[in-house]
Structure formats: C-alpha cells, structure tokens
Amino acid sequence: MRGLKNSIVHFIKGTDWILLFLAIVTSAFGALMVYSAKLHSITSGIPREALVMIIATALGLVAAIVISLIDYDILCKLWFIWAALGIGLMILVMSPLGVAPPNRPDSQIWIPLGFFYFQPSELVKVLFIITFSTHLSVMKQSINKPLNILLLGLHALVPTLLVMKSGDDGSAAVFICIALAMLFMAGIGWQYILAAVVLVGAAIPLLWFKFFSDYQKQRFIVIVDPEAYPDVAYQQNRGITAICNGGFLGEGLFKGTYTQSGSVPVSESDMIFTVVCEELGFVGGLAAFALIFLIIFKVIRNGRKSSDTATTFMSYGIGAMIASQTIINIAMCLRVGPVIGITLPFFSAGGSSTLCLYIGLGLALSAFRTNYNQKPKNFRLTGVSTPFRV
C-alpha cells in the first residue's frame, strides 16, 4: 500500500501540471473558435471539426502522459525504428493510398483511415525531433567537425525532401526551422550559419525558376501585389478584412460578420486566427498568442533545466515546432507570408495535428520528469548504436 502511495506521489510531483493546464486551456480556446468558425454550416449539435478536435485533445493528453513515463533513453536507443517509421509513412502517403485535401488538390498529404484522414507529416515532425536529438547528443562534443555537420544536414534533408515531394511545402518549412533551431542551440559554429545563409540566398533563384510552379510563385507575388492574382489573394484578403472588422474588442463570440457568413475560406483551419481577431478583437488575438508563447516558454524551460542533453534537444525541437508553425500561420493570415497550409498550434481544426502536437508535448513532460528524477550532473548520452558517430 505504501509502495502504491509513493508511486502516486512520485507521478504527481514528476508531472508538469502547469504545462498541461496551459495546453488544456489553449486547446479549449481553440475548440471554441473552431466551433464558431463552423457554426454557420450546421443547424444543431457540434460541428464535426470541433468534435474531432476535442476527441484528439483528450487522446493526446493520455498519449502525452504515457510518453512522459517512458524512459527517454529507450526512445533514443530505438532511433532507427522512429526513422524507419517516419520514412515509411511518407512513402505510404505518396503511394496510391494517399489522397489530397479538397482545398489543396496539388498536395497528396492524407491517408484515409475510414473515420478520419491522417496526415503523416505531423507525426513525422515528432519522430524527427527524437532522432535528431539523439544524433546531436552523440555528436555534441564534436558537432563542428565538417563531416558531422554534413551528416546532420543529410539527416534533416531526408524528411524535408520527402515532405516536399508529397506537396506539403508548409511542413517542409517547419522541418527546416526545427533543424536550424536545434543546431543553433547545440552550438553550431557561426561559420556554418553564415555559409547556410549564403547557400540559401544562392538557391532562391534556382528554386524560383526551376522548381516552383506558377501557382506557388503567385502565392508569393500576391503578398506585395494582391491585385495581380485576385483569385489567389482572395483567402488572405477576406482574412485581413475579417481581422480589421474585429477592431480592439471584436464583434463578439459567434457574431463575426465575415466568420458567420462563411466569407473566409478554411477559417476553421488555416485562417483560424482571423476568427479569433474578428470575434474577440485585438485582445483575443493577443490572448491566443500569449497562451502559445507561455507553452513554448515552459517547454524550453523544461529542456534547459533537464540534466541530460537528449531531452534538452527534444524540448528545443518541440518549442521550435510550435513557434515556427505559429509564426508562419499568423504571417499567412496577415498576408506577410504565403499561404502554405500550416495550422495554428492548439487552435486550428485537425485531428492529426492536435494529437501529434500532444505527443510532442509528452517529450517536454518527459524532460520535466527527468529533471525531477535526477540530480544535476554532467551528462552525455551513451550506449546508443548509431552510424552517425564520427
């Protein structure tokens, strides 16, 4: 009986309840906004998108707590399984089994599972964070050797190219942001950062003229000249109009003129921030941003306080994933960035994105539990079999 009591006490004290509370509050806020965004399309009950989000959040909370109880060392030692699973999922989605969303016919990013559509790239982000954290941890002491940098670059390039091949440019951009943030926090030399900036700058003309389709180019052009392609700019124009219509305090929950008339395309997902701002105003938008910022801060803080490098890098990766998606999504809504189909974490509709987001939070909860279980000490991951050690 005492052993059970001690286990319960250990579980309670080792769980980051503040992070869980912030995540639940933010998800509840998001589900309410999704409900409002789809309210005009139903006559009674709860919109399917909001219901799926609530179920995904509940399942995600269970998954996050379970993952937090798993020894991080086990996750790291099984890196090859996560790598194979990630590659396999991306190959599967590009097979005849994969389908494209109705509003994105050029992107084959879903796998139909009967009762819902699963987007593999959302889970692959988390799997990549685990494998890349392991890679960084075993190379930490010699990360700035040229060969190690090359291997790390190849590691990040594989999932990025696979996701791009499926037509999901937005997720590919998130993978790049995650990798760069984790490399920076791992202490990569400035010479490599400058070299990367030069390389990216040199690659832009090549990407523009050789790889971007006309429609992809148009999505960038309308940022500075929305009248050049009115059809392409329509979604963002409607979104900006809705945001401006909200003013400082908004028109009121369930009372947004453009939201409740369905004037903003995909307002429940890509453009959910416009719903928040129109109905709850600048104050509501600021509150949404603040909640996400607090979650990112808590995730990174857990990593910085952790006594091992692997969980530290995992926390940095999860923080970078949430931050990059938030910045890209809000940039889309404000028409300072192209529409590339990135959801706003905790707010946008989508079972896959919500569930996988909580799976990622499980890694941050694991970092908190690791710090609770262990006294601070010098640590370097050992016992991981990998071909990346140089």
Image (cartoon, grey):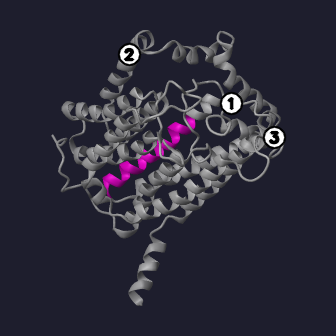
Residue at which label 2 appears: 203
Q: Is residue 335 above or below residue 174?
A: above
Q: Residue at x 74, y 45 (%)?
A: 36
Where is the N terminus found, in terms of image quarters?
bottom left
Left or right of 231 in this view: 342? left
Measure how far apart labels 3 and 2 are at the Cα level.
Answer: 43 Å
Asked if the residue at tag 2 contacts the one at tag 3, i.e. Cβ–Cβ closer than 8 Å, the answer is: no
Asked if the residue at tag 1 contacts the one at tag 3, i.e. Cβ–Cβ closer than 8 Å, the answer is: no
**Disc 2 residue type?**
Ala
**Disc 1 residue type?**
Pro
What main secondary structure does the magenta stretch of the protein show?
Answer: helix
Measure how far apart labels 3 and 1 are at the Cα level.
Answer: 20 Å
Q: Secondary structure at mark 2?
A: helix
The numbered disc on residue 265 is 1
Residue at which label 3 appears: 250
Q: Nearer the viewer, residue 216 or 15?
A: 216
Give coordinates of residue 62: x percent, y percent.
Answer: 49, 63
**Disc 3 residue type?**
Gly
Give coordinates of residue 261: x percent, y percent.
Answer: 80, 34
Marks 2 and 1, the one that precedes in the sequence = 2
Q: Residue at x 56, y 35 (%)?
A: 327
